[in-house]
Image: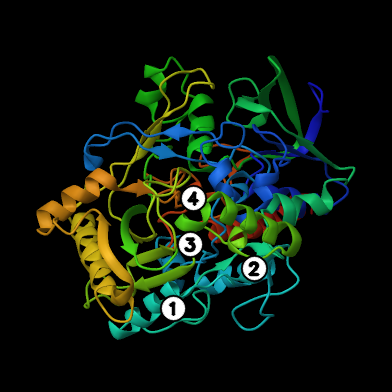
């Protein structure tokens, strides 16, 4: 257990999807001391390691921060749940396991925004380095990396029917959304191995946790950055544990690396006096460095969950009946097979909401189950869910502290559907979902549309329905935006160093200038892989 006043070369705040990667890579050099701080506990909850266990870990305060948004005008004034992992592995320990990199154009756009070294050609080696791809290595994939990536095996007739109906609507089959082309319909790949979740805590941290130069502290609640007098050089970090304040410090040339995610990282910066000056003053925080972009530029994927009753058994039937549920459990315990090995969705579709587009702008997540929202009781009928999200929303929100107390959650203002294009895209996506379900062979399975309901017909009513039922798909990003000094909204540079502050970087999904086109866990891991090389190279350069 670390004690106050200990010194380290690297202090990593947050042991999530990025933090575990950094701890592994930076501690490879046995001449440096690395401290990894995690506000949550160890990943000992058995449900964490069962792929379908996210039903048990979401909304559980022992594994989930249990954030809620502010009332959002774009969602009919609703506050919605924003789960984020609070445990070793972070959100990679409680997410839906879905492995999607995004489109090459996403990263080329980052480069076009002035972030040298972040084009797709630049980042592909890091995606490959992370992977232990079940299919083996090729020009798109890697093998032997810490992150197990496997194919989805639990398939059903209704899933096959959806893929066929997509093809009938001009959407081609796609066996690899992380290959040459993202567009198409097919099965997800997932971060699992032999029926068990493969979080970054399992893949990156577990193999190296006994290194004598790596210290892992759980239940360590971040309090804020420490500085040398009135300077802008970070000297350490303060955290609380069991009601006691602890301060740890950097060795000369060391760095604090914030890896606390799109909510936690901007919150830590703001609490430490780095952020929009007016916001800091409102909360009685001394402005150390006015950086207006901290907490701004928030982006997320908003999912519209459409539910259909079907005429074949789904997981609803199996989970709602005691005997079937017991058989599923036995199959998993003894064979590591069956429904409990499934990620959050089985079939994925990337397609265009408008024919004029060059690349897919919407993504479908299809599940042979249904509920009002993930993590609660299944519907009492045989149901399937067609969840669709806009990949590159134009709406922007913000994260803003409301108190100088670190225990007080910040304000989360997503501002969903505040832009006209986002509204139009959502309506088009819902119409396309209905087209898929009214096309053979899928239509032969459909009994009725349960949500929003076939009585919802006009564009205005569809949009209103989306506002009434939409939920996050758990992909907050971009609140510590990467960009050059001429970008007034940028928080970090292309090396992920915080503008105007020495000895401080941010490495997590918050640095994405724009959200990636798909699930965000894989890109976050890539960011950490690339950052580790930049940090190591920077240290090597400083030593010469």
- The dot on residue 193 is none
Name the spot of residue 83 as percent of width and height, x first: 49, 40
Q: Nearer the viewer, residue 491 or 54?
A: 54
Up the image or down, 401 lies above or below 300; here it is above
Give the labeled residue for mark 3. Answer: 345
Q: Are marks 2 and 3 in contact (CB under 8 Å)?
A: no
- The residues tagged by marks 1 and 2 sit, at their Cα atoms, a distance apart of 22 Å
Name the spot of residue 6 as percent of width and height, x first: 81, 27
Q: Residue at x 41, y 17 (%)?
A: 283
- Front: mark 1 or 4: 4
Q: Residue at x 45, y 52 (%)?
A: 484
- Front: mark 3 or 4: 4
* Mark 3 surroundings within 10 Å by alpha-carbon count, few (fewer than 14), some (14 through 19), many (20 or more): many
Label 3 or label 4, whichever comes before in sequence order = 4
Q: Residue at x 23, y 42 (%)?
A: 74
User: Dot 1 lies on which element?
Assistant: helix
User: Dot 3 lies on which element?
Assistant: loop
Give the labeled residue for mark 2. Answer: 149
């Amino acid at each position: 257990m670390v004690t106050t006043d200990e010194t380290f070369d690297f202090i990593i705040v947050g042991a999530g999807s990025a933090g575990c990667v950094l701890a592994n890579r930076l501690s490879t050099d046995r001449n440096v001391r690395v401290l990894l701080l995690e506000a949550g506990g160890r990943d000992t909850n058995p449900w964490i390691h069962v792929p379908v266990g996210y039903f048990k870990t979401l909304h559980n305060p022992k594994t989930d921060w249990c954030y809620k948004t502010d009332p959002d005008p774009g969602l009919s004034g609703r506050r919605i749940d924003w789960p984020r992992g609070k445990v070793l592995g972070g959100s990679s320990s409680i997410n839906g396991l879905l492995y999607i990199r995004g489109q090459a154009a996403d990263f080329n756009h980052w480069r076009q925004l002035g972030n040298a070294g972040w084009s797709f050609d630049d980042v592909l080696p890091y995606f490959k380095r992370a992977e232990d791809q079940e299919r083996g290595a090729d020009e798109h994939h890697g093998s032997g990396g810490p992150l197990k990536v496997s194919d989805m095996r639990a398939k059903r007739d209704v899933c096959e029917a959806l893929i066929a109906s997509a093809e009938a609507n001009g959407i081609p089959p796609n066996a690899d959304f992380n290959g040459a082309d993202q567009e198409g319909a097919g099965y997800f790949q997932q971060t699992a191995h032999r029926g068990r979740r493969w979080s970054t805590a399992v893949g990156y941290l577990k193999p190296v946790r006994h290194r004598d130069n790596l210290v892992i502290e759980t239940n360590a609640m971040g309090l804020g950055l420490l500085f040398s007098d009135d300077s802008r050089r970070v000297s350490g970090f303060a955290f609380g544990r069991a009601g006691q304040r602890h301060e740890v410090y950097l060795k000369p040339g060391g760095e604090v690396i914030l890896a606390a995610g799109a909510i936690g990282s901007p919150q830590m910066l703001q609490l430490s006096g780095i952020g929009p000056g007016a916001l800091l003053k409102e909360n009685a925080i001394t402005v150390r460095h006015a950086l207006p972009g901290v907490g701004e530029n928030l982006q997320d994927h908003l999912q519209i969950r459409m539910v259909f009753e079907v005429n074949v058994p789904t997981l609803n039937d199996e989970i709602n009946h005691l005997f079937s549920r017991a058989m599923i459990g036995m199959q998993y315990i003894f064979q590591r097979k069956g429904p409990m090995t499934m990620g959050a969705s089985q079939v994925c579709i990337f397609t265009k909401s408008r024919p004029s587009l060059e690349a897919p702008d919407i993504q479908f997540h299809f599940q042979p189950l249904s509920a009002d929202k993930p993590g609660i009781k299944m519907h009492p009928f045989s149901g399937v869910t067609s969840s669709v999200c806009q990949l590159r929303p134009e709406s922007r929100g913000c994260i803003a502290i409301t108190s100088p107390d670190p225990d007080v959650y910040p304000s989360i203002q997503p501002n969903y559907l505040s832009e006209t294009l986002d509204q139009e895209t959502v309506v088009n996506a819902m119409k396309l979902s209905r087209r898929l379900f009214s096309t053979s062979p899928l239509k032969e399975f459909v009994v009725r549309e349960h949500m929003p309901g076939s009585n919802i017909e006009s564009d205005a009513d569809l949009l209103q329905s989306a506002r009434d039922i939409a939920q996050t798909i758990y992909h907050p990003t971009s609140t510590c935006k990467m960009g050059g000094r001429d970008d007034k909204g940028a928080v970090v540079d292309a090396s992920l160093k915080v503008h105007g502050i020495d000895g401080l970087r941010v490495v997590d999904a918050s640095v994405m200038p724009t959200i990636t086109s798909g699930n965000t866990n894989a890109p976050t891991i890539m960011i950490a892989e690339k950052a580790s090389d930049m940090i190591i190279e920077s240290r090597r350069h400083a030593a010469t």
